[in-house]
Amino acid sequence: MLHNRIALLRTERNVTRRELAEAVGVNFQTIGYLERGDYSPSLELAMKIARFFGLPVEMVFSFEPFAPLAAELMRAKASLAGEP
């Protein structure tokens, strides 16, 4: 299964499924299928979605479940502070 952050990124940026779909050239239902994990995107579609959000593809899609963003932010903050 391919995990993704599409719903989170859409919500964060106030983008509808329809707006994202139009920007990347798919039906808006496809975005819903992707968000639920019912469909895995082609490489081309994954790259278009990542480009839309201005992120590397691996920040949007992963073979492993994503850690909660709060945990990632805490880890980044600790790293910047020089904590182990």
Image: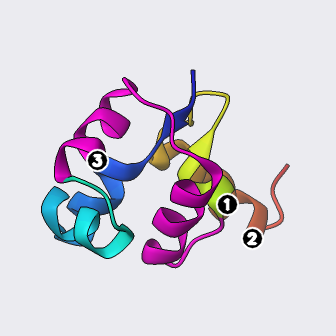
Q: Which mark is residue 29?
A: none
Q: Residues within 10 Å of mark 2 (few under 14, many from 20)?
A: few
Q: CA distance from mark 2 to mark 3?
A: 35 Å
Q: Is residue 34 above or below residue 13?
A: above
Residue 17 visible? The answer is yes
Q: Which residues are magenta?
A: 28-56
x, y percent for residue 67:
56, 36
Residue at 52 percent across and 33 percent down: it is 3
Amino acid at pointer 2: Leu
Task: Give the residue at mark 1.
Answer: 76
**Could you tell me which secondary element the residue under label 3 belongs to?**
helix
Residue at 77 percent across and 61 percent down: it is 79
Task: Give the residue at mark 3.
Answer: 31
Label 1–label 2 contact, CB within 8 A: yes
Q: Residues within 10 Å of mark 1 (few under 14, many from 20)?
A: few
Q: Is residue 3 above or below residue 54?
A: above
Amino acid at pointer 1: Ala
| Earlier residue among tags 1 and 3 | 3
